[in-house]
Image: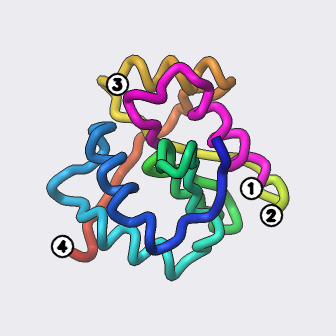
Amino acid sequence: MQIRPFTPEDTDAVIELWTSAGLVRPWNDPRKDIERKLTVQPELFLVGESDGVVVAAAMVGYDGHRGWVNYLAVSPGSRGLDYGRRMMEEAERLLIELGCPKLNLQIRSDNASVRAFYEHLGYTEDAAVSYGKRLIAD
């Protein structure tokens, strides 16, 4: 797998990947999320490609205080090949280059397999509660 920055030509493949990975929700329009990401640190929107096929993707960001990873997905047929680990290593590398001291991510509390994946990579649950407020309805 080669990791590279997202290009607009990747849009349909990335949305299909996110959908197959169960990341798309009715309240988050993936096309709008992509459009928004391309206006802020587009170089941190990563795609993993194998034999010309998008098999992994992740939106990475840094706000000057914390780094974030959103929408990390690996295609169901490519799981177990260390693609998720490699995507996270690249995200971490890029964030370290920017001087980011800590990376945060959010996991749905009932997603045991994803929790185990991140724990295997050295992530721990923070003693924090995530709050949100929708500012723009999709």
Q: Secondary structure at mark 1?
A: helix
The image shows residue 48, relative to residue 127, as above or below, that is below
Query: Badge 3: few (under 14), some or many (20 or more) residues near its Cα, within 10 Å?
Result: few
CA–CA distance in space, label 1 to label 3: 25 Å
**Residue closest to the eye, 108 or 84:** 84
- Which disc, if any, is residue 12? none
Give the residue at mark 2.
Answer: 98
Give the residue at mark 3.
Answer: 111
Q: Earlier in the sequence, mark 3 or mark 4?
A: 3
Give the residue at mark 1.
Answer: 95
Amino acid type, residue under disc 4 in the picture: Ala
Question: In the rendered structure, which segment of residues is drawn in magenta?
Answer: 73-95
The quarter holding residue 47 reads bottom right
CA–CA distance in space, label 2 to label 4: 31 Å
**Residue closest to the eye, 54 or 59:** 54
- Give the percent coordinates (x, y) of residue 55: 48, 42
